[in-house]
Image (cartoon, rainbow, N blue to C red):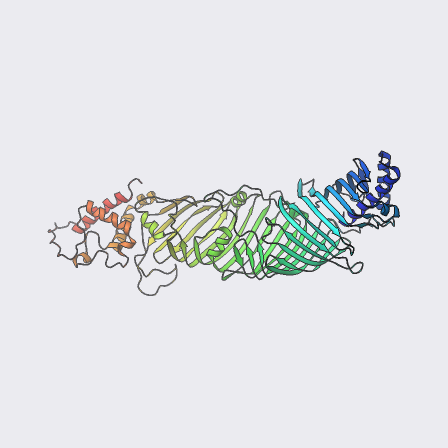
Amino acid sequence: MKLSKLAGILIAVIVVAAVLLVVVGIPSGAVTSAIQSRIERDTGYRLAIGGASKISLFPGFSVTLNDVTLQDPNDRNPDSRFTIGRVRAELPLGSVISGKPRVTELTLTKPELRVPLIRERAPTASSPPSPAIRNGRQIDTVIDRVIVEDGVVVMANAADRVEDRIERINAEITIDAERRVSAVGGAQLGGKPATFDIKASPPAADAQPVPVELKLEAPDLLRAPLAAKAEVRLRGALLQINGLSGTLGDGAFNGWASADLAGKPRLKLDLDFQRLDLGHPRTPAQPPGAPWSDARIDLSGLNYVDAELRLSANALNLGAAHFAPASIDAKLIGGVVTAQFSQIGVYGGEAEGQLGIDASQRTPSFSLRGDLDGVRALPLLSGLAEFDRIDGKMQAKLALRGSGDSPRAIMASLAGTAFVNVRDGEIRGLNVARMIRNLTSATLSGWQENGTEATDLTQLGASFRIAQGKAATADLALAGPLVRMTGAGTIDLGAKTLALKVEPKLVLTTQGQSAPGEPQAGPTAEPVGLGIPVMIEGPWASPRIFPDAAGILDNPDQAYARLRQMGKGLFGALGGGANSSAGGAPGADNPLGGALGESIGRLIQQGLQSGGAAGPSTGATPSQPPPQQPGAPPADRIDNDAAMNAIMKQLFRGQ
């Protein structure tokens, strides 16, 4: 039911009612029946007046009808109807008598327009003639002002139990002597307030397009006010919008659009933006460790419209993330969306991919394929996910699928593969080398964040196989100037938990190391590990990090040897050695000295003291060692073994 038809029929109702009321007076049921018959005969629309109708002569001539319902008898959908709580028209009595009524003010109180949502698009059929003109009767009436009070548009599909509403529509529409129309008002879209200002000029001739200007402000839906102008033409059920141009905030755009309104709407839209801002820059962040939301994601509306969209932008701002340039081609058919992203510039790199949404079933499903290359990680992850811990050049390949009607359900159902690699950057707020050192004295609770510290990265990468929301990796690798780590395990994306086992190593030189598989120029120092696996378990916001006691028991000799090697590399030979004899300072061969191994060094020194071994001398000539028995192990070896026993007791007491 078109709005132009509704306006004409309402005027017909008022005119017929006015004539009958003037002749008969306050109408009885018989007069009301006469009004209904006259309207259906002249317009073809079925009218029902459920309430009282009256005429008033003071302070001016007016007609009031209550509980008015209007339906098109040719409409096969019974849900399509227009109801009005009260219709009141003010008009000069002389204009009614002359047969050329002029309505100075028409007030519609609580109008409700019900529009059926059609799921399947029927074959195109010829439309019947407009009921308003099929009997050769035209309504020649002038309206100066229309007021809409507390109106509602209800879009519903009873079979699917779907209903969307535009509520609290309040508007004032004025029409000047040259038939220029101005409509100003507000409404609530999905419970969010919006205001509009529409202007339309009459066409120069019949069948010519109508120039239309629109201003729309919806702070909760649009980041900035929308202003647009276009030439609008209605040919049967086809609405054409040509010469479309305007601004969204500070970004200009141009393009065209069309809508086939016969049955299930079919939209086409092609727009080119200088700058397109979508979403809000910052939304309230959830507390660290908060579970995924169970809030329902309602995509049912995708089933009731088909569309083809092409959007391009020199700059696209999605929340706080920036893309330049960007191009999106999307199709929506039968509740299934396919969106192709290409030629997207992302923070020094490029991205392309495809997003799929299937809302045709009760539970929607999703798919995502993405390929990023040379993208700076920090601004992208910070803008999209408020994750600001990793920086560097990122390469990523994603092939994911999932289903669910809430964020928690989607994350728990994810499946597919993913590969992520970050090079030449840093982990912000974390000192991984310090964490490894601290593991020798205590279990760590959480990531030990410190905003002033960072871990330089040569490379951080992993590949994942994902099933039922759990991402498993066997090739987690971290390489940096002072630390190297490999590992494997599982990340539970739905529960936001980690279960990883890693092998950390410290590099006992300031010259650093290359990424795995790459040659390094100049002399290098082999990274030295704890010889003990490290477990990372629990919520990913604050996991428990601790040495794997089972790993120590599986191979205690290796654990002893590794710790002894770390002690030598950091502080020279345990219990004295070449440097001590020559008067060198402890750790002189290691440029990092105690700065790198402060925690381990303290424990080693405590172990030496408890084992009775003398510390390194500071230049004095060492005393002559007592003669050894034949076949006995060297004294320094006995001392070192005793020292290591003491150290191990200190390191792993309580395990």
Q: Is residue 68 visible?
A: yes
Measured as percent of width and height from the top left, residue 466 is found at 49, 48
Measured as percent of width and height from the top left, residue 253 is found at 63, 60
The residue most toward the front is: 59
Of 20 and 650, nearer the camera is: 20
Measured as percent of width and height from the top left, residue 540 is found at 43, 45
**Quadrant position of the C terminus in the picture:** top left
Reply above or below: 33 against 398.
above
Of 409 and 467, nearer the camera is: 409
Measured as percent of width and height from the top left, residue 460 is found at 42, 55
Of 628 and 472, nearer the camera is: 472
Image-based side of 392 in relation to 148, left or right = left
Q: Which residue corresponds to the image point at 17% horizontal and 46% vertical from the top-left?
A: 612
Of 225 and 477, nearer the camera is: 225
Asked where in the image residue 309 lies, by quadrant, the reply is bottom right
Q: Which residue corresponds to the image point at 12% horizontal and 50% vertical from the top-left?
A: 628
